[in-house]
Image (cartoon, grey):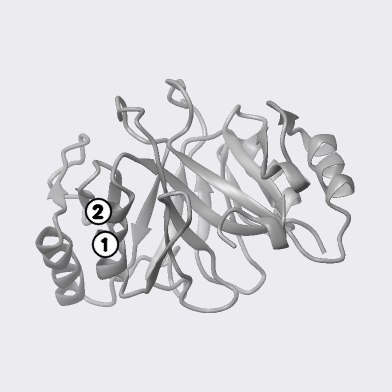
Amino acid sequence: MTSELFAICFDTARPSHAARFWSGLLDRESAEGPGGDVTILPADPTGFRIRFLPSQEPKTAQNQAHFDLTSTSPDNQRETVARALRLGGSHLDVGQLPEEGHVVLADPDGNELCVIEAGNRFLADTGPIGALACDGTRDVGRFWSEALRWPLVWDQDQETAIQSPNGGTKITWGGPPVAPKTGRSRVRFELAVPAGVPWEAEVDRLISLGATRTGPGGSDDGPLPLLDPDGNEFLSCPRDRSAGG
Protein backbone atom coordinates (compact mmCIF):
# COMPACT_ATOMS: atom_id res chain seq x y z
CA MET A 1 0.00 0.00 0.00
CA THR A 2 1.24 3.50 -0.88
CA SER A 3 -0.08 7.05 -0.99
CA GLU A 4 -3.65 7.47 -2.22
CA LEU A 5 -4.96 10.47 -4.12
CA PHE A 6 -7.26 11.84 -1.43
CA ALA A 7 -8.25 15.15 -3.06
CA ILE A 8 -7.65 17.67 -5.82
CA CYS A 9 -7.44 21.02 -4.03
CA PHE A 10 -8.28 24.45 -5.47
CA ASP A 11 -7.35 27.76 -3.83
CA THR A 12 -10.23 30.21 -3.96
CA ALA A 13 -11.42 33.37 -2.26
CA ARG A 14 -14.97 31.95 -2.15
CA PRO A 15 -14.91 28.22 -1.31
CA SER A 16 -18.68 27.94 -0.81
CA HIS A 17 -19.38 29.72 -4.10
CA ALA A 18 -17.01 27.50 -6.09
CA ALA A 19 -18.21 24.34 -4.37
CA ARG A 20 -21.84 25.18 -5.12
CA PHE A 21 -21.00 25.37 -8.85
CA TRP A 22 -19.12 22.06 -8.94
CA SER A 23 -21.58 20.26 -6.70
CA GLY A 24 -24.40 21.25 -9.03
CA LEU A 25 -22.45 20.51 -12.19
CA LEU A 26 -21.33 17.06 -11.08
CA ASP A 27 -24.47 16.27 -9.03
CA ARG A 28 -22.40 15.46 -5.95
CA GLU A 29 -22.84 16.29 -2.28
CA SER A 30 -20.60 18.77 -0.51
CA ALA A 31 -19.44 19.13 3.08
CA GLU A 32 -18.07 22.16 4.89
CA GLY A 33 -14.78 21.86 6.79
CA PRO A 34 -13.71 23.52 10.03
CA GLY A 35 -11.33 25.98 8.35
CA GLY A 36 -13.72 27.54 5.85
CA ASP A 37 -12.95 24.90 3.22
CA VAL A 38 -15.63 22.99 1.35
CA THR A 39 -15.28 19.48 -0.07
CA ILE A 40 -17.14 17.87 -2.98
CA LEU A 41 -17.49 14.25 -1.97
CA PRO A 42 -16.52 11.44 -4.36
CA ALA A 43 -19.14 9.60 -6.36
CA ASP A 44 -17.85 6.24 -5.09
CA PRO A 45 -15.42 4.97 -2.43
CA THR A 46 -12.53 4.71 -4.90
CA GLY A 47 -12.83 8.30 -6.15
CA PHE A 48 -11.10 11.47 -5.01
CA ARG A 49 -12.53 14.54 -3.33
CA ILE A 50 -12.47 18.05 -4.80
CA ARG A 51 -11.57 20.53 -2.07
CA PHE A 52 -11.89 24.31 -2.20
CA LEU A 53 -9.52 26.01 0.22
CA PRO A 54 -9.78 29.65 1.32
CA SER A 55 -7.07 31.87 -0.13
CA GLN A 56 -6.70 35.58 -0.72
CA GLU A 57 -4.11 35.13 -3.48
CA PRO A 58 -5.65 36.46 -6.72
CA LYS A 59 -5.74 34.32 -9.86
CA THR A 60 -3.31 35.98 -12.27
CA ALA A 61 -2.69 33.30 -14.91
CA GLN A 62 -4.23 30.24 -16.47
CA ASN A 63 -4.22 27.29 -14.07
CA GLN A 64 -1.67 24.58 -14.74
CA ALA A 65 -4.40 21.94 -14.38
CA HIS A 66 -8.06 21.74 -15.33
CA PHE A 67 -10.85 19.18 -15.50
CA ASP A 68 -12.02 17.67 -18.79
CA LEU A 69 -15.66 16.61 -18.50
CA THR A 70 -16.99 13.88 -20.78
CA SER A 71 -20.15 13.77 -22.89
CA THR A 72 -22.27 10.81 -23.91
CA SER A 73 -23.84 12.56 -26.92
CA PRO A 74 -23.95 15.99 -28.59
CA ASP A 75 -27.15 16.75 -26.67
CA ASN A 76 -25.47 15.75 -23.42
CA GLN A 77 -22.56 18.08 -24.16
CA ARG A 78 -24.94 20.96 -24.80
CA GLU A 79 -26.83 20.15 -21.60
CA THR A 80 -23.61 20.14 -19.54
CA VAL A 81 -22.55 23.49 -21.00
CA ALA A 82 -25.99 24.98 -20.36
CA ARG A 83 -25.99 23.71 -16.77
CA ALA A 84 -22.55 25.19 -16.17
CA LEU A 85 -23.72 28.58 -17.47
CA ARG A 86 -26.86 28.46 -15.30
CA LEU A 87 -24.70 27.76 -12.25
CA GLY A 88 -22.55 30.83 -12.87
CA GLY A 89 -19.93 29.59 -15.31
CA SER A 90 -18.90 31.45 -18.44
CA HIS A 91 -17.43 30.81 -21.87
CA LEU A 92 -13.66 31.27 -22.09
CA ASP A 93 -11.37 31.95 -25.04
CA VAL A 94 -7.97 30.31 -24.62
CA GLY A 95 -7.17 30.26 -28.32
CA GLN A 96 -9.25 27.22 -29.27
CA LEU A 97 -10.17 26.92 -32.93
CA PRO A 98 -13.81 27.07 -34.12
CA GLU A 99 -13.61 23.56 -35.56
CA GLU A 100 -12.50 22.01 -32.26
CA GLY A 101 -15.25 19.99 -30.68
CA HIS A 102 -14.66 20.75 -27.01
CA VAL A 103 -16.14 23.74 -25.19
CA VAL A 104 -13.91 25.80 -22.89
CA LEU A 105 -15.55 27.32 -19.84
CA ALA A 106 -14.60 28.93 -16.54
CA ASP A 107 -16.23 28.33 -13.18
CA PRO A 108 -17.35 31.36 -11.12
CA ASP A 109 -13.83 31.68 -9.66
CA GLY A 110 -12.21 31.70 -13.11
CA ASN A 111 -10.93 28.11 -13.01
CA GLU A 112 -10.78 26.66 -16.50
CA LEU A 113 -12.63 23.51 -17.53
CA CYS A 114 -13.44 21.77 -20.80
CA VAL A 115 -16.56 19.89 -21.83
CA ILE A 116 -15.27 17.30 -24.28
CA GLU A 117 -17.29 16.22 -27.28
CA ALA A 118 -18.92 12.79 -27.38
CA GLY A 119 -16.95 9.93 -28.89
CA ASN A 120 -13.54 10.86 -27.45
CA ARG A 121 -11.84 7.46 -27.39
CA PHE A 122 -9.09 8.43 -24.96
CA LEU A 123 -11.64 9.33 -22.29
CA ALA A 124 -13.99 6.41 -22.95
CA ASP A 125 -15.21 4.69 -19.77
CA THR A 126 -13.58 7.22 -17.45
CA GLY A 127 -16.73 8.74 -15.97
CA PRO A 128 -18.04 12.32 -15.86
CA ILE A 129 -14.61 13.75 -15.00
CA GLY A 130 -12.62 12.24 -17.82
CA ALA A 131 -9.29 13.78 -16.97
CA LEU A 132 -7.36 16.25 -14.92
CA ALA A 133 -5.27 17.80 -17.69
CA CYS A 134 -1.99 19.27 -16.43
CA ASP A 135 0.97 21.19 -17.77
CA GLY A 136 4.00 19.05 -17.08
CA THR A 137 6.99 17.13 -18.29
CA ARG A 138 7.32 13.45 -19.01
CA ASP A 139 9.43 13.14 -15.84
CA VAL A 140 6.61 14.42 -13.64
CA GLY A 141 4.12 12.04 -15.23
CA ARG A 142 6.44 9.13 -14.53
CA PHE A 143 6.97 10.39 -10.96
CA TRP A 144 3.25 10.40 -10.26
CA SER A 145 2.85 6.96 -11.81
CA GLU A 146 5.38 5.63 -9.29
CA ALA A 147 4.12 7.76 -6.39
CA LEU A 148 0.51 6.57 -6.69
CA ARG A 149 1.34 3.24 -8.34
CA TRP A 150 -1.08 4.09 -11.10
CA PRO A 151 0.01 2.60 -14.43
CA LEU A 152 1.00 4.78 -17.34
CA VAL A 153 -1.78 4.54 -19.92
CA TRP A 154 -0.04 6.94 -22.33
CA ASP A 155 3.67 7.70 -22.76
CA GLN A 156 4.40 9.13 -26.18
CA ASP A 157 5.93 12.31 -27.66
CA GLN A 158 6.74 13.61 -24.15
CA GLU A 159 3.04 13.37 -23.19
CA THR A 160 2.03 11.07 -20.32
CA ALA A 161 -1.17 9.91 -18.65
CA ILE A 162 -1.90 7.72 -15.66
CA GLN A 163 -5.06 6.07 -14.40
CA SER A 164 -5.97 4.22 -11.23
CA PRO A 165 -6.09 0.42 -11.55
CA ASN A 166 -9.73 0.86 -10.51
CA GLY A 167 -10.41 3.03 -13.57
CA GLY A 168 -11.98 6.46 -13.43
CA THR A 169 -10.42 9.85 -14.08
CA LYS A 170 -7.10 9.98 -15.92
CA ILE A 171 -4.39 12.48 -15.02
CA THR A 172 -2.50 13.77 -18.06
CA TRP A 173 0.59 15.90 -18.65
CA GLY A 174 0.98 17.63 -21.98
CA GLY A 175 4.78 17.78 -22.19
CA PRO A 176 6.83 20.76 -23.38
CA PRO A 177 6.53 23.63 -23.66
CA VAL A 178 5.47 23.87 -20.01
CA ALA A 179 4.14 27.26 -18.96
CA PRO A 180 6.31 28.92 -16.30
CA LYS A 181 4.96 28.90 -12.77
CA THR A 182 3.76 32.19 -11.32
CA GLY A 183 3.60 31.70 -7.57
CA ARG A 184 2.09 28.75 -5.76
CA SER A 185 -0.01 26.33 -7.77
CA ARG A 186 -3.73 27.04 -7.31
CA VAL A 187 -4.52 23.38 -8.06
CA ARG A 188 -2.74 20.80 -5.92
CA PHE A 189 -2.83 17.10 -5.05
CA GLU A 190 -3.49 15.99 -1.48
CA LEU A 191 -2.21 12.50 -0.71
CA ALA A 192 -3.31 10.30 2.18
CA VAL A 193 -1.16 7.48 3.50
CA PRO A 194 -3.36 4.51 4.46
CA ALA A 195 -3.61 3.27 8.02
CA GLY A 196 -0.95 0.70 8.77
CA VAL A 197 1.58 2.25 6.38
CA PRO A 198 4.40 4.10 8.20
CA TRP A 199 3.92 7.73 7.19
CA GLU A 200 7.60 8.69 7.55
CA ALA A 201 8.69 5.76 5.40
CA GLU A 202 6.18 6.76 2.71
CA VAL A 203 7.49 10.34 2.71
CA ASP A 204 11.02 8.97 2.33
CA ARG A 205 9.82 6.90 -0.63
CA LEU A 206 8.30 9.97 -2.31
CA ILE A 207 11.55 11.87 -1.80
CA SER A 208 13.54 8.98 -3.27
CA LEU A 209 11.33 9.24 -6.38
CA GLY A 210 12.12 12.94 -6.82
CA ALA A 211 9.90 14.89 -4.40
CA THR A 212 11.39 17.56 -2.13
CA ARG A 213 10.28 19.02 1.20
CA THR A 214 9.27 22.68 1.29
CA GLY A 215 8.72 23.23 4.99
CA PRO A 216 7.69 21.75 8.34
CA GLY A 217 4.55 19.77 8.91
CA GLY A 218 3.29 16.25 8.68
CA SER A 219 1.81 13.71 11.08
CA ASP A 220 0.72 15.50 14.28
CA ASP A 221 1.65 18.90 12.78
CA GLY A 222 -0.74 18.53 9.85
CA PRO A 223 -0.13 17.80 6.15
CA LEU A 224 3.48 17.91 4.96
CA PRO A 225 4.07 20.23 1.97
CA LEU A 226 6.21 18.75 -0.79
CA LEU A 227 7.18 19.57 -4.37
CA ASP A 228 7.05 17.16 -7.29
CA PRO A 229 9.91 17.12 -9.85
CA ASP A 230 8.31 19.99 -11.82
CA GLY A 231 8.10 22.14 -8.69
CA ASN A 232 4.35 21.71 -8.16
CA GLU A 233 3.18 21.78 -4.56
CA PHE A 234 1.36 18.81 -3.06
CA LEU A 235 0.48 17.59 0.44
CA SER A 236 1.06 14.29 2.22
CA CYS A 237 -0.69 13.25 5.41
CA PRO A 238 -1.62 10.06 7.29
CA ARG A 239 -5.15 9.07 6.28
CA ASP A 240 -6.64 9.66 9.74
CA ARG A 241 -5.19 13.19 9.82
CA SER A 242 -5.81 14.22 6.22
CA ALA A 243 -7.09 17.76 5.93
CA GLY A 244 -10.43 16.60 4.55
CA GLY A 245 -11.09 14.10 7.33
SS of the residue under disc 1: helix
Residue under label 2, please give it: 17
Q: Is the Cβ of the residue at disc 1 closer than 8 Å to that at disc 2?
A: yes
- Tell me the residue at 50%/52% (across/down): 8
Residues 172 and 214: in front is: 214
Q: Residue at horizontal 25%, vertical 69%?
A: 24
Can you say which quadrant of the picture contains the C terminus? bottom right
Numbered label attached to residue 158: none
Note whether 153 is above or below 172 in the view shown.
below
Residue 133 seen in the current view:
yes
Q: Position of residue 9 (x, y in %)?
A: 48, 48
The residue carrying pointer 2 sits among few (fewer than 14), some (14 to 19) or many (20 or more) residues within 10 Å by Cα, namely some
Q: Secondary structure at mark 2?
A: helix
Q: Is residue 173 above or below residue 79?
A: above
In the visual, does 160 lie left or right of 207? left
Would you say residue 116 is visible in this rendering? no
In the orientation shown, which residue stands out farthest toward the front?
Answer: 34
Residue 218 location (% of width, % of height)? 74, 42
Q: How would you rate the neighbour count of disc 1 (Cα within 10 Å): few for under 14, some for 14-19, many for 20 or more?
A: some
Type of amino acid under label 1: Arg
Question: Position of 220 compared to 104: left or right?
Answer: right
Q: Nearer the viewer, residue 60 or 244?
A: 244
Q: Residue at x 72, y 36 (%)?
A: 217
Q: What residue is rendered at 44% in x and 48% in y?
A: 133
Quarter that holds the N terminus: bottom right
Q: Which mark is residue 20?
A: 1
Query: How far apart are labels 1 and 2 at the CA level?
Result: 5 Å
Q: Position of residue 10 (x, y in %)?
A: 42, 45
Identify the amino acid type marked 2: His
Relative to 113, does residue 183 appear above or below in the rendering? above
Q: Where is residue 39, by image quadrant?
A: bottom left
